[in-house]
Image (cartoon, rainbow, N blue to C red):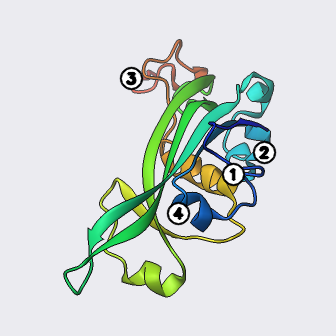
Amino acid sequence: MSQSLSSSAVLDNPRMFDVFAFVRKQQQACGEVLVQDLPRILNEVTPDKLVQHPALRWSATGALRQELAADDKTVAMPYLRLTLQGALWLECQRCLESYPEPLTIDIWYRIVENSAQADAAPANDGHTDVIVGSHQFDLIDLIDEELLLSLPLVPKHPVCPFVHESIIGYGAETSN
C-alpha cells in the first residue's frame, strides 16, 4: 500500500489516524491500496486474476459543514468524504469468465463520537452515511467495507463474450 499526500494533509498511517483531528483541520489525503490488503474484497474477486488487479486509488477529505441544531443555531458538523476509483476482477455469473468491474465511489460520512449519536442521527440520504469516528480510525477498513457494498449483487458482463456450455441448448425442445 502506498500513499501520497496533498501539501495540506498529514496522514502517516491510513490504518490508524485521528479522524476527528483530520476533519477538524479540514485536511486531504490520497493514496492507493492493493486488493491483497482488503480481506473482505479478497474473498469476492477472481483468484486467478489477482495479479492483474491494479491498485485502487482513494482520496479522503475532512470538512466541517454548517447545520441547523435543535436550538435554531448553526453548528459545524464533522464530515469525511471518501472517493475510490479502480476496477475489480469478478466472475461473470452468465458465462463464468472473469471480467473487470469498474468502480467509482464518492460518498460523504457524517462523523459522530459514539453509537448513541449514530442512532440519533437522521437517516442517511443515499449520499451521506453516519459512522462512528475514532482517534485510531482505520480508513483502509472503511474502504474495504465500502467496496464490498458497491459490488453488483450478480456480477456479469454487459455482453458476455461467449455462451457457457452449461446453457447451450437451454430452452430448446428435446426429442426422444
Q: Residues within 10 Å of mark 1 (few under 14, many from 20)?
A: some
**What residue would you read off at disc 3?**
173
Mark found first going from the N terminus, 3 or 1: 1
Mark 3 → mark 4, Cα distance in angstroms: 67 Å
Look at the numbered disc 2 and give the secondary structure of its residue: helix
Instruction: Give the label, 3 or 1, closer to the camera.
Output: 1
Identify the residue position indicated by label 2 in the image: 37
Q: Residue at x 51, y 33 (%)?
A: 103
Q: Secondary structure at mark 1?
A: helix
The residue identified by callout 4 is 24
The N terminus, quarter of image: top right
Where does the image place residue 15, in percent across and percent down from the top left? 75, 56
Q: Secondary structure at mark 4?
A: helix
Residue corresponding to mark 1 = 140
* Disc nearer the start of the sequence (4/2): 4
Query: Pointers 3 and 4 in contact (CB under 8 A)?
Result: no
Q: CA distance from mark 1 to mark 4?
A: 20 Å
Q: Do callouts 2 and 1 mark residues in contact (Cβ within 8 Å)?
A: yes
Disc 3 marks a residue whose amino acid type is Glu
